[in-house]
Image (cartoon, helix red, strand yellow):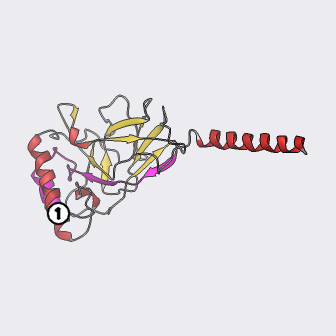
Amino acid sequence: MTGLLRKAALLAAAGVFITSAAMAGVPSPGNSTVPACISLVGNAAGIPDAAGTFSVTVRDLANNPLNGASVVIDLSGCTDLSICDDQLDAGALVNCAAKTTRKFTDALGAVSFTVLGGSNGGGNATTLLGGGKIYANGVLIGSPTASAYDLDGASGVGANDLSAWLGDFGSGNAFGRSDYDCSGGIGANDLSLWLGDFGSSASTTSCAVACP
């Protein structure tokens, strides 16, 4: 009987070890840190607009940070947004057909993005809240709302973009592309954020080539 108990204990310990090993390396949506919303921006003289910078931290099921995890920002579900084929970031890998940009985490499981892109002009908003997707090693870890300051996708952030924003606001729909403050709606604070970005002159240039 003692031998059987010893074997049972060893099997149980082995099971715990195997389970722990399986948990390690698997991204956990609950333990990872992702933004509730992201904003697509332009650039000025080849420098991406810092207003669009955000970070993702990937942790596994045991709450350990994952080094070298592949993090993908997927905007394929945002039919009124486009990303630039050149993100002006040597670490960003763009897949135009899939409308994604990919980077890899550091030793702390963290990675920062500034996604360059824009939208398709006044009256063309289609996507509501939570249209973006963030994947880590193929696991969905977040569904942020995706907005864009350059709402017409041309000539940087300017008067035509303000006109498009006002149209989105007046529609009464919670179009994600104009919700900069993650409030779940379009209002005065979003306008304030747009005006701030316009005034910064940090998004004076749109995509040279936008992914279709």
The secondary structure type at the circle numbered 1 is loop
**Which residue, as the protein is rendered here, is positioned at the far front?**
2
Task: Identify the residue at horizontal 30%, vertical 44% (top origin).
Answer: 210
Of the pair 33 and 62, the residue shown nearer to us: 62
Magenta region: 137-165
Q: Depth check: 22 or 197 in front? A: 22
Residue visible at 73% across and 41% down in the picture: 13
Q: Nearer the viewer, residue 174 or 18?
A: 18
Q: Position of residue 29 (x, y in %)?
A: 47, 50
For this view, does 124 lie left or right of residue 67? left
Count every numbered label the image shows and give the total. Answer: 1
Q: Nearer the viewer, residue 62 or 45?
A: 62
Q: Residue at x 12, y 54 (%)?
A: 192
Q: Is residue 141 magenta?
A: yes
Tell me where residue 136 appears, x and y as whole percent.
48, 43
Residue beneath disc 1: 187
User: How far across and down, in percent of the image, does residue 179 sit?
Assistant: 24, 58
In the rendered structure, the answer to whether residue 26 lies left or right of residue 203 reads: right
Residue drawn 27% across the image and 53% down it: 147
Amino acid on which disc 1 is placed: Gly
Q: Quadrant of the N terminus?
A: top right
Which residue, as the protein is rendered here, is positioned at the far bottom?
A: 172
Q: Is the residue marked by circle 1 packed among few (<14), some (14-19), or many (20+) residues within 10 Å?
A: some
**Residue 164 in sight:** no
Reply yes or no: does residue 62 show up in magenta: no
Answer yes or no: is residue 38 visible.
yes
